[in-house]
Image (cartoon, rainbow, N blue to C red):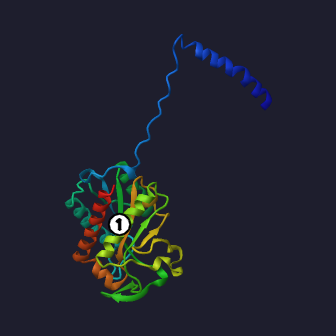
Amino acid sequence: MRQSQSIVAILVLPLVASILLSSLGAGQVAAPRKIAKPKPTQSAAKCEMSKFRIVVDVGHTPDSYGALSARNDTEFGFNFRLARQIAAKLKSEGFAATRLLVTDGKARPSLFKRVGAANDGRADLFLSIHHDSVPDKLLESWEFDGANSYFSDRFSGHSLFVSQRNPHFATSLRLARMIGRQLKEQGLHYASQYTLPLMGRYRRELLDKDVGVYRYDGLVVLSRTSSAAVLLEAGSIINRDEEMTMNSSERQELIASAVAAAMGEFCEKR
């Protein structure tokens, strides 16, 4: 069967070519096909601060509020307050197109909702704000305001996550490093426990041991966004002392200033 198909091709193809050439007429030649110029990639695009679209995502929702702090406050509340401060700071620094993204609904549907909102809005950068806890096996119990509560004072600090599945992984990593350096310059330290075996399924690969950038490919908001994306765990709210610090306007302003400085540096070097 293959041999007969080859014989037909040999006979027919010259005939088709002859018909096409004769249809051009005397002195005419086929116009060369235009090759489309590749569109510039996001990493090469110029950053005009006033038009640079940054989405500051409030991690979790009122219905799916994330972790509980040592004093039984929801992570969503911490996330919202800090994300709002970061968005305001970015706008005051000239990033006028910054958008604060708040979603609703249950956990997994809300993840795809925020990714869809960022992609539909053609975000240039996506920054998701969260606050940290620890695996349940590391929690200790205590009583706060007459209620049974849980804490872990063993770990503290912030952490940054990027996904290698993101189409702009290199850009995401560069931005995460810039944020990490700014936080370090403010005297803050990153959470190092993610490299430890005791973290179990939460254990992550450390990409930058100087400023605390980890790889986390399984996060929908990092892997499914069309733009560069970074997730910031701003601090541990299960640590009783750090929870109080994270709730202060001083710490929120410090983190917001560090993020804005990093964004400014990132934009300047584009």
* Left or right: 255 as drawn, with respect to 162: left
At x 26% / y 68%, what residue is drawn?
A: 256
In the rendered image of this protein, does residue 117 appear above or below residue 57?
above
- Can you see residue 81? no
Q: Position of residue 101 (x, y in %)?
A: 31, 58
At x 41% / y 83%, what residue is drawn?
A: 155
Looking at this rendering, what residue extends furthest in the top direction? 26
Depth order, front residue of 65/21: 21
Determine whether the residue tagged by mark 1 lies in a helix, strand or loop: helix
Depth order, front residue of 201/62: 201
* Left or right: 45 as drawn, with respect to 27: left
Residue that label 1 marks: 178
Report which quarter residue 81 is drawn in: bottom left
Report which quarter residue 248 is drawn in: bottom left
In the rendered image of this protein, does residue 261 appear above or below residue 224?
below
Report which quarter residue 265 is drawn in: bottom left
- Can you see residue 265? yes
At x 24% / y 56%, what residue is drawn?
A: 95
* Left or right: 205 as drawn, with respect to 94: right
Q: Position of residue 132 (x, y in %)?
A: 39, 75
The disc labelled 1 sits on which kind of residue?
Met
Q: Position of residue 250 (x, y in %)?
A: 22, 76
At x 22% / y 59%, what residue is drawn?
A: 91
Looking at this rendering, what residue extends furthest in the front direction? 27
* Quadrant including the N terminus: top right
* Quadrant including the C terminus: bottom left
Q: Position of residue 231 (x, y in %)?
A: 39, 65
